[in-house]
Structure formats: structure tokens, C-alpha cells
Image (cartoon, rainbow, N blue to C red):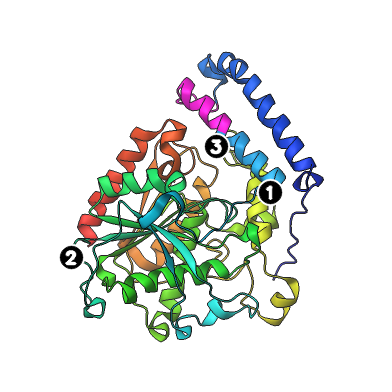
Amino acid sequence: MADLRPHAPSILTYQPFKLLWSTLYITFSLTRLPLLFLYYLPRFNRQNSTYTLAQAIRIRIIRSFLYNAALVRMRVPESLKPGKEKERFVVIKPTSTTSYTGVAACDPETIPQPLGATWYPSPPAPTTSPSAGSGPEDVKAVILHFHGGAYAIGDGRTEDCGYAAKTSIAQTRATHMLAPQYRLASNGTRFPGQLQDAISAYAYLLNDLGIPASNIIVAGDSAGGNLALSLLRYLADEGAAAGLPTPAAALLWSPWPSPVSILKDPSSFYRNPNAGKDIITNNFGLWGASVMLPKPEVARKSGEASLEHPAIDFLGNKGFRSDCPMFVSAGECELLCSDVIRMYEGLREVNGGKVVLDVMKGCPHDCILIGDKLGFDEEAQEGARRAGRWLEEVM
């Protein structure tokens, strides 16, 4: 096991320096917008020659946001109040303790907790007999989608996952999507807390609502894609003992294959040919991976409490066998593209044709989540349509 050390925060993570820096940074970013317009006007100055002027500027703006979010270690509240989501927001209680075993129980300091989740476009109609296994009548198929954000930002609510939900429902057989507000590592919940929340959300669909596994599609983007894979690996290893069946399919959008890899080799970012084309910054990945690290004393006591565990590191470990068909998507211009392809090849070697790869030509990271903000809406819609056609074949 490698000697992994967290990325130390800077003085800008503390008040009043945090507020002062953020104010200056936002002001500076706004004043240079006209300069960015002029700079990217010639196509040869853009991050990628296929990007439009609007795409180039938007990628630069979002990249700057992620850089500053990591620099000051932005905090995202984890409120269990409905807020603007109103009746679409639900609070999910932990399921039976027997469902959390193996790696999900490797840290005695990290235990299952209630979590929030947002329904799209609305909650399913109530059912009188969830134990019957047919679920609500208006649910043809439901996507359990875990949001991205390096395990450090995001909440699954409308401003975060609204676009992904609208796109996924419009282009696939799914009638509903549930986006859990899993606990963030940036707020103090280390691995395997996020996996525990994924188990709770999956069990909620199965047991509380009575939706059969054959109608559930597990999905996730970026870090959420890593979490979706983590859940699939857990179900493959512990599902029978935990009483949790395999879902019908999985959609993995720009999944983060190995959070630990950036801690092992922080300079790998700068050697990546897509580093200048994408929205992801080096410090953003370092921040997310650092705050995920289990405490050293816990890691010493439990060999499973590690970011090198097969349930979270899908590059440092061989592909795992799963009965769940997987659709793996990556942007051609995203930083993670080569890692995603390596991960796909490992999964394909073990599972054969059940795992397919879709590379979105000329796209940066995570178009399914923020394609509208990046200026890649058409590409995101077409990628979701391809996923929808694939779902028709496997479900």
C-alpha cells in the first residue's frame, strides 16, 4: 500500500482570506472576459481547433471556477430540508445494517446516515404494496444517478442535476430519475461514507418503493461515475449477503476511474495531452482525492479502508465481474479519456460484450451534467440518445 499524503490546504481556505480572495478573483475574471473573447477569436488560439468561440470561452470560465473552488475549498451545505425542490426532495434513512458489510463497514467512525435525494421530474405515485416488487405504476424505469464534483462539490438538486435529469429522461426509456445528495468528502465524510449512501439509495428504491432491480439503471458522472462503479463492485462482491440484487444496467458518464492515482503522481496532470483542452484542473482532483483519504489510524487497522481498494480504484486493480451491462462514455478531449478507456478495457476483458464504450467526439469532461453550460448541448443529447438505444437492447 502506497504512503499517501493529503494535499495541504492553503491560507486561502480560512476566513477572511477566503472571502477576500474570492471577491478579487471573481472581479478579475469578469474584467478579463472581453480579453478572452479577443484571444479566442482566432481558432488557432482555442483549446481545441474544433471548439466554437462560445465553447472555448465557457470552458475557460468553468475551468477557472473549479480552480478557485479547489483553491479556497468551497463548502457545499448538506441540508436535509426540501428547499426549492419541495415535494421532489426526500430523506432516505439507512437500510438494514446487514446491507452494509465488507468494505462498506471498514471504518467504524464512518457509519450510515440519513441522506437527501431529489426526484425528477416528480416523485413516483404512491404504491399500496411496495413489497410486491412491481413498484409504482408510473415508473417504467428509474435512473439512480450520482452527481459529479470530485466528491467535493455537488448536491443532486435541480441547479446541479436538473440538466442531466432532463436529458436522460428525454433520451432514454427512463420515466424518473433519483439523484442522491450523498455525503461529501469536503464536509468531512471519508471513504466509504459515499458508498454507504449509494447502498442506502439503492435499497430505498428496492425495498421502500418496491421497484424491481430489473427496472433500475444505476448511473453517475465523473466522481458519481466512480461511485456508481463502486456500488456495482459492492453488489458483485457482497450483494448476495446484503440482500441486494444486480440492477438492470449502468450508465457511466466520464467516470473518474481512480481518485488515488493523482495522489500517487500529481504531475501526471501536466503530462496529459488533454490537460489544456478540458475543464478539470490539477488542484481540483487533488482536493477531492485528499479529502477522501481515510484517516491514517483507520487505514492501519483496516486494510480495506484505502483509496487503493478495488471498490474505488478501477485502474490499479483488475476489472471485476458483474452481471450488470455497462455503458461507458468519455469525451474525446477530456483529461480522463485515456484512463476511462483503460478502465473500460479491463472491464471488457472480464465481462465481454456486456460493457460498451462510447467516445463523444470533440467533447470535454462531463457533458451529461453541464453540456448546456459548456455549449455542448447537442453533443450531450446525442450521447444520451446512443445510451438510450443501448438500453433498449439490454433491458
User: Picture coordinates of residue 148 (x, y %)?
Assistant: 50, 52
Residue at far right of view: 11
Note whether 302 is above or below 307 in the view shown. Answer: below
Note whether 189 is above or below 132 in the view shown. Answer: above
Where the C terminus falls, by quadrant? bottom left
Closer to the camera, 147 or 74? 74
Distance, label 3 to label 2, CA atoms, is 42 Å
Query: Helix, strand or loop at disc 1?
Result: loop
Identified at 60% across, 58% down, the residue is 259
Quarter of the image holding residue 138? Answer: bottom left
Identified at 71% across, 67% down, the residue is 2
State the extent of the magenta-drawn residues as a range: 47-61
Q: What type is the residue that disc 2 sits on?
A: Glu
Q: In the rendered picture of this protein, how many numbered marks are placed on residues?
A: 3
Eye-nearest disc, 1 or 3 = 1
Residue highlighted by disc 1: 73
Residue 278 is marked as 3
User: Picture coordinates of residue 275 (x, y %)?
Assistant: 60, 38
Of the image marks 2 and 1, the number of the one nearer the N terminus:
1
Of the image marks 1 and 3, the number of the one nearer the N terminus:
1
Residue highlighted by disc 2: 137
